[in-house]
Image (tube, rainbow, N blue to C red):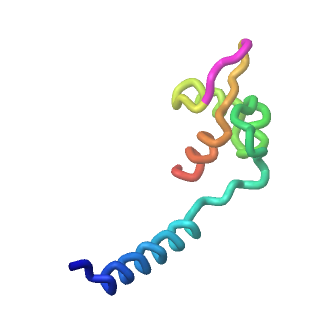
Amino acid sequence: MIDIALLDRLIADLTELRAALETDRPQVEPEFAPGETLIDTATASERFNLPPDTCRWLAREKGLGEKIGGRWMLDAAALRKYRSDA
């Protein structure tokens, strides 16, 4: 036989868990456009207060960017995560 009271408690617990997870979602930083992914080293240097050489090093050695047309372009989200983890 199915215990309806048990099912109701489980559903209530899951609903509470879902609500808690919804409030834990990270907020997007307003300084970055939603579709923006790659920024040049000068922009990265200015936004993240890093020397341009460090930005190039992070792109090259840490895999936070790629070279496009002879210029290093950094992934803004990856750089933001790297800075928050450091």
**Number of labelled discs?**
0
Which residue shows up at 69% across the image and 23% down it? 72
Left or right: where does residue 58 sit relative to residue 47? Answer: left
Q: Position of residue 35 (x, y in %)?
A: 74, 39
Residue 43 lies in the magenta stretch:
no
Left or right: where does residue 39 sit relative to residue 64? Answer: right
Q: Position of residue 39 (x, y in %)?
A: 74, 33
Residue 33's place in the image compared with 56, above or below, is below
> In this orientation, which residue lies closer to the viewer: 76 or 5?
5
> In this orientation, which residue lies closer to the viewer: 67 or 45?
67
Q: Residue furthest left?
A: 1
Magenta: main secondary structure: strand
> In this orientation, which residue lies closer to the viewer: 19 or 78?
19
Q: Residue furthest front?
A: 1
Q: Position of residue 40 (x, y in %)?
A: 75, 29
Q: Position of residue 62 (x, y in %)?
A: 52, 31
Q: Quadrant of residue 66?
A: top right
> In this orientation, which residue lies closer to the viewer: 58 or 80?
80
Residue 24's place in the image compared with 83, above or below, is below
Left or right: where does residue 4 sit relative to residue 67? Answer: left
Q: Which residues are magenta?
A: 65-69
Q: Quadrant of residue 11?
A: bottom left
Residue 67 lies in the magenta stretch:
yes
Which residue shows up at 38% across the image and 82% down it? 8
Which residue shows up at 57% across the image and 52% down it? 84
